[in-house]
Amino acid sequence: EVQLLESGGGLVQPGGSLRLSCAASGFTFNTYAMSWVRQAPGKGLEWVSAISGGGGNTYYADSVKGRFTISRDNSKNTLYLQMNSLRAEDTAVYYCAKVKLEYQLLIYFDYWGQGTLVTVSS
Amino acid sequence: DIQMTQSPSSLSASVGDRVTITCRASQGISNSLAWYQQKPGKAPKLLLYAASILDSGVPSGFSGSGSGTDYTLTISSLQPEDFATYFCQQYDSTPGTFGQGTRLEIK
């Protein structure tokens, strides 16, 4: 059974940093691209970042480019999102999501974690 | 970025009703469209991809169609568990963008 378990969310002041983690199990982690998708309170979904299965290719939304860094440790089956220079508008539930097809990077997601809440506020 | 516009934003319906939700892209997306269902406090669940292919385990009462810029999600006979928010997502170009959601409520 595929499982994705996010952690690392919390309250942080504007300008601060936070690192999210997503522990994956139940599938061959290193053959699937992964993404982070966020949802501001009461709002819709926004794709944030993606990384290829091997980790060599990464993509970012313009809204986070230069501030967020996606990475993965395939030996630990874990995905990360390092978030720096956080702003109030980054407040959201952050989901990690697995793409449905092996070796495809930017498509649709068949499994999502339960989400972790990041609140940026002074 | 491709803009995705869903309509309606909210919809009230009764168990057994047939409902249709529309998603319009700001440019053609070559059937690269997925639909998700989200219940309060839960992660989205994939329903369909490639505009009309049902994901595994999704009830056959859900169906999708469309081409070019216009796509629809149809629920043939609403069940109590279908009341949720539905999102479309285009993955034809980066960044993959989502519609704003359609909240389906019980009448």
Image: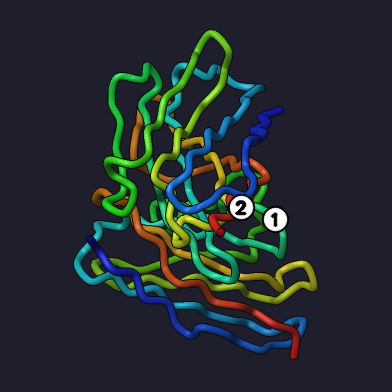
- Relative placement, left or right, of B52 versus B103 is left
* Residue type, numbered disc 2: Lys
Q: Residue at x 59, y 30 (%)?
A: A22
Residue A47 drawn above or below residue A7: below
Tell me how the rendering is colored. Answer: rainbow
Residue B73 drawn above or below residue A87: below
Which one is in front, A113 or B78? A113
Q: Which residue is mark 1?
A: B42
Q: In the displayed image of the protein, which residue is found farthest to the front? A: A122
Q: In the displayed image of the protein, which residue is found farthest to the top? A: A75
Q: Residues within 10 Å of mark 1 (few under 14, many from 20)?
A: few
Q: Residue at x 51, y 72 (%)?
A: B101
In what quadrant of the picture does the C terminus of chain B appear?
bottom right
Secondary structure at numbered mark 1: loop
Q: What percent of the width, then of the height, locates residue B10?
A: 57, 85
Secondary structure at numbered mark 2: strand
Q: What percent of the width, then of the height, locates residue B41?
A: 72, 59
- Relative placement, left or right, of A56 versus B33 is left
Q: Residues within 10 Å of mark 2 (few under 14, many from 20)?
A: some
In what quadrant of the picture does the N terminus of chain B appear?
bottom left
* Subunit ID for the residue under disc 1: B
Residue B14 drawn above or below residue A40: below
Q: What percent of the width, then of the height, locates residue B76?
A: 63, 74
* Residue type, numbered disc 1: Lys
Residue B47 in sight: no
- Relative placement, left or right, of B77 versus A94 is right
* Subunit ID for the residue under disc 2: B
Q: Which residue is mark 2?
A: B45
Tags 1 and 2 in contact by the CB under 8 Å rule? yes
Spatial CA distance of label 1 from label 2 is 9 Å
